[in-house]
Image (cartoon, rainbow, N blue to C red):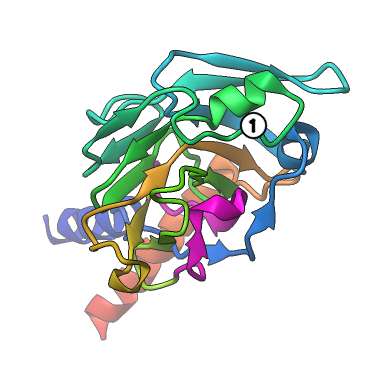
Amino acid sequence: MKLIAVLASALALVAAPSAAAPIAWQSPVAITTADAALNLGGTIEYAVSWNGQGPVSVTLDDSSVVEFQSGSIDGNGLAQVSGAYGICGTNCAQFYGTSNSAFNNAVGGFAYDGVQDVTLTNLTVGREYSVQIFSLDNRGCCGHQVQYWADMVGNSTAGFAHNLAIYTIGTFVADAAMQSFRGYTNASSQCSAQQCTNLNALVLRSADAADVPEPAALALLGLGVVGLAMRRRRA
């Protein structure tokens, strides 16, 4: 019975979910064309738009298509959002910055206000991902507001104004089937931390050469943990 308890404890240690993985944030990039914004490295796992008008298919110059699913703020979907006050529909952001009208539509609305917690789902543990976040607003009222995106362990982007029409990318190695991050504003942007947050769209990509542990490797890891636990018990 004692051996069974040791095995159970060791296996629980292997299987237990860990905290959200740290995210390495890249410098923001200006949106010039839809192709430059979406034809990046890696494999697109899914794309989500909070334009309030349903799915959007964006066809690029090379005839590839990026399908943006319809985002919501009720905790459903591939990318779950909580804390937003509502969704401002297509063209709310007054973004017409590219010649691709479908792309402009995909990023033209947003989930607005609140401290927005975003949770990515359907991740594979051990795989490297990048999340591309579009957060913009060209309206005269609010384009100057400063926003940040941060992981749950203290790493954040530099502050940026919504009217810069940029995107930012964060890279992480999944340590669970979900990954969370947060969008918020700063009082220095003439906006309280509860207001003026924008999430227009996101694209989740996995690395082309992802280093995903094989089942046999995971089994060996489990045996190693069991052996370590038994040695510590004998000591």
Mark 1 is surrounded, within 10 Å at the Cα level, by few (under 14), some (14 to 19) or many (20 or more) other residues, namely some
Q: Position of residue 116 (x, y in %)?
A: 29, 48
Depth order, front residue of 106/17: 106
Residue 66 visible to the viewer: no
Above or below, 168 relative to 208: below
Residue furthest right in the image: 62
Question: Which image quarter is the N terminus in?
Answer: bottom left
Magenta stretch, residue numbers:
156-178
**Relative to 64, is 158 above or below?**
below
**Residue annotated with mark 1:** 96
Quadrant location, the C terminus: bottom left
The image shows residue 183 at horizontal and vertical percentages of: 36, 55
Choose top left, top right, bottom left or bottom right for residue 27. bottom right
Residue 63 placed where, x, y %? 84, 16
In the visual, does 78 lie left or right of 235?
right
Q: Residue at x 50, y 53 (%)?
A: 162
Q: Is residue 224 left or right of residue 61?
A: left
Q: Residue at x 56, y 44 (%)?
A: 216
Say which amino acid is labelled 1: Tyr
